[in-house]
Image (tube, rainbow, N blue to C red):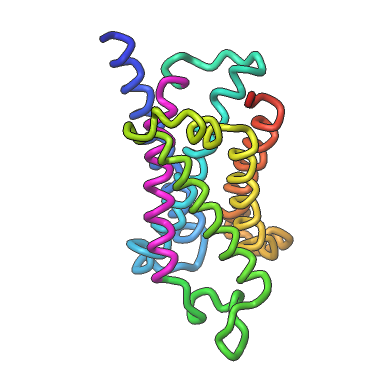
């Protein structure tokens, strides 16, 4: 009972702190130091904070185990909290995907559209990477479903090193094509703070390396 309480508390703290810091970063970058009016917070900016929270939580979920394999002393409460962290990250990804779908129009994301309203090459690649990443993450989330736990082949595939690296590759592609042009112009960063897409990319790139080195099939 004591171990279960510690696990539950670890997951709650990690999720709460990650969400607070991520949303605070979005507010600081776009509202406090940037030109975005506060009227855009409930949907446009909150969506960015939710996206950052989701990517960081998924990074934690993917990396705690491999880090432990590499000899880093990851607390037991963190290791046992991976399921809650992963499922929360996936739910936040779904919220981000739905909000982004409603926001994705030339008036808001003009850099991803041609004058005739069609997607640019980079816009299409970013959306493709995002869709594939969502599908792969959905498959990973299925591994937590009780009725599928007895399917050993499915669980072995979903939790394999190749599957994880595929999920991360699609996510990295989505983030890269979504924001790399803005990454190249630090002078345009609001208050000198890196874009959220870049912060998310760095987290996922570190997770990719950690999983490449520490995940066991």
Residue 31 location in percent, x, y? 44, 60
Q: Is residue 147 left or right of residue 26?
A: left
Q: Nearer the viewer, residue 127 or 178?
A: 127
Q: Nearer the viewer, residue 217 or 90?
A: 217
Q: Report if residue 60 is visible in the image.
A: no
Q: Is residue 193 left or right of residue 83?
A: right
At 47% across and 78% down in the image, what residue appears? 105
Residue 39 location in percent, x, y? 34, 68
Residue 154 location in percent, x, y? 49, 36
At 42% across and 42% down in the image, what residue appears? 89
Q: Which residues are magenta?
A: 79-102
Q: Nearer the viewer, residue 157 or 110?
A: 157
Query: What is the residue that sits farthest to the top in this orientation?
Result: 2
Q: Report if residue 67 is visible in the image.
A: yes
- What is the quadrant of residue 44 in the picture? bottom left
Q: Main secondary structure of the magenta part?
A: helix
| 1 over 51 or under it: above or below | above
- What is the quadrant of residue 110 in the picture? bottom right
Residue 37 location in percent, x, y? 41, 69
Please check the rendered image and state whether residue 90 is part of the magenta-colored stretch, yes or no: yes
Q: Is residue 60 left or right of residue 203?
A: left
Query: What is the residue that sits farthest to the right in this orientation?
Result: 184
Quadrant of the snapshot with the N terminus = top left
């Amino acid at each position: 009972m004591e171990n279960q309480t510690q696990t539950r508390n670890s997951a709650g703290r990690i999720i709460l702190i990650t969400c607070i810091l991520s949303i605070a970063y979005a507010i600081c970058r776009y509202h406090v130091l940037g030109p975005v009016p506060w009227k855009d917070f409930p949907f446009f900016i909150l969506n960015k904070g939710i996206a950052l929270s989701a990517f960081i939580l998924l990074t934690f979920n993917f990396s705690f185990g491999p880090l432990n394999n590499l000899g880093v002393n990851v607390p037991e409460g963190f290791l046992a909290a991976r399921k809650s962290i992963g499922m929360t990250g996936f739910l936040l990804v779904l919220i981000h995907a739905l909000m982004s779908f409603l926001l994705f129009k030339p008036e808001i994301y003009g850099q991803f559209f041609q004058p005739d309203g069609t997607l640019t090459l980079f816009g299409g690649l970013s959306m493709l990477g995002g869709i594939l990443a969502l599908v792969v993450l959905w498959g990973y989330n299925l591994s937590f479903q009780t009725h599928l736990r007895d399917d050993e082949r499915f669980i072995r595939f979903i939790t394999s090193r190749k599957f994880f690296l595929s999920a991360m590759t699609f996510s990295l592609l989505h983030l890269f094509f979504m924001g790399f042009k803005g990454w190249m112009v630090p002078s345009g960063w609001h208050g000198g703070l890196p874009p959220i897409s870049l912060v998310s990319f760095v987290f996922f790139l570190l997770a990719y390396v950690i999983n490449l080195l520490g995940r066991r099939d």
